[in-house]
Amino acid sequence: MKKKVIIIILLMALLSIAGFSIYNNYKNKNYKESTTDAIKFMIEYENLNNKLKADGINKHTEINIIEENVIKYSNYNEIVSVLDSGTGVIYFGYPECPWCRNAAPELVKVAKETGLETIYYFNDMSIRDQKSLDDNGNVIVDKEGTDEYYNLLTRLSDYLGSYKGLNDETIKRLYVPTVVFVKEGNIVGVHIGTVESQTDPSILLNDEQREELQQIYRENMEKVLNNSCSLDVPC
């Protein structure tokens, strides 16, 4: 009798697990088939939660992206159009980037709070170059970037940092996350990374750090929404 009870309990447990798995697969399938960029972005970032990184040892941090976000997947031409004459917020990043995983939830949250209509999302990982130093200290190109990437470097050069480890301040790199705030074709703010006190992106921002980052995003979004100003002309 006890054996039958145990078997029944085990079967019920297996059915519960199977049902939960089917439900999750169904939900994810519906999300993936959605045409909404907001849902796609949420899935893109949350699907990596606690999954192993490329090194096969460490795991991606667990984050939550609000479903009601204003992300718009953008291509190179659209990004250039905003930089040339548009108004909006451009987010350069990708889901595997640990710094981006800290920044993205706060960025979309503040956008919703401020009433910003669109965040133009551009994943530049595949178009970036890769450089290093050889044994003689010469810069070598391990992977050439695309023309589009080098054009972005030129357009944003005044706001970008140098390529780390090359000992050449003139060589720029579009690190992520980089958020560019544009008002009528004028760059009114740029924020790279998260906050200075965060030194390890595998440890998520604490409440104080999140508030600090949110405030940075909030102040820059208000420039986009309310004022005609630039980095050279204070608001």
Image (cartoon, rainbow, N blue to C red):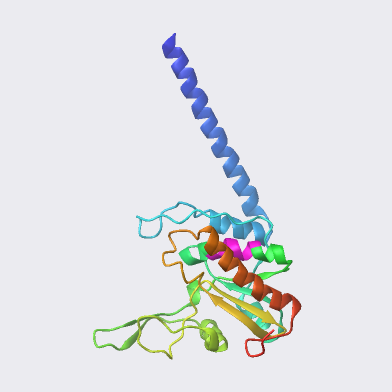
Where is the N terminus found, in terms of image quarters? top left
Q: Height in image: 8 above or below 76?
A: above
Residue 133 appears at what percent x and percent y? 31, 83
On the picture, is 200 further left or further right than 115? left
Instruction: Count the labels in the image.
Output: 0
Task: Residue lying at the far front in this picture: please name it.
Answer: 208
Residue 201 appears at what percent x and percent y? 44, 63
* Main secondary structure of the magenta stretch: helix
Task: Residue lying at the far top in this picture: please name it.
Answer: 1
**What span is colored magenta in the figure?**
103-109
Q: Which residue: 57% across, 54% down?
A: 64
Q: Height in image: 38 above or below 82?
A: above
**Quadrant of the image occupied by residue 135:** bottom left
**Quadrant of the image occupied by residue 21:** top right
Q: Which residue: 54% across, 85% down?
A: 159
On the picture, is 16 further left or further right than 172? right
Nearer to me, 72 or 212 = 212
Q: Is residue 190 magenta?
A: no
Q: Is residue 108 magenta?
A: yes
| Residue 64 visible in rendering | yes
Residue 176 appears at what percent x and percent y? 50, 73
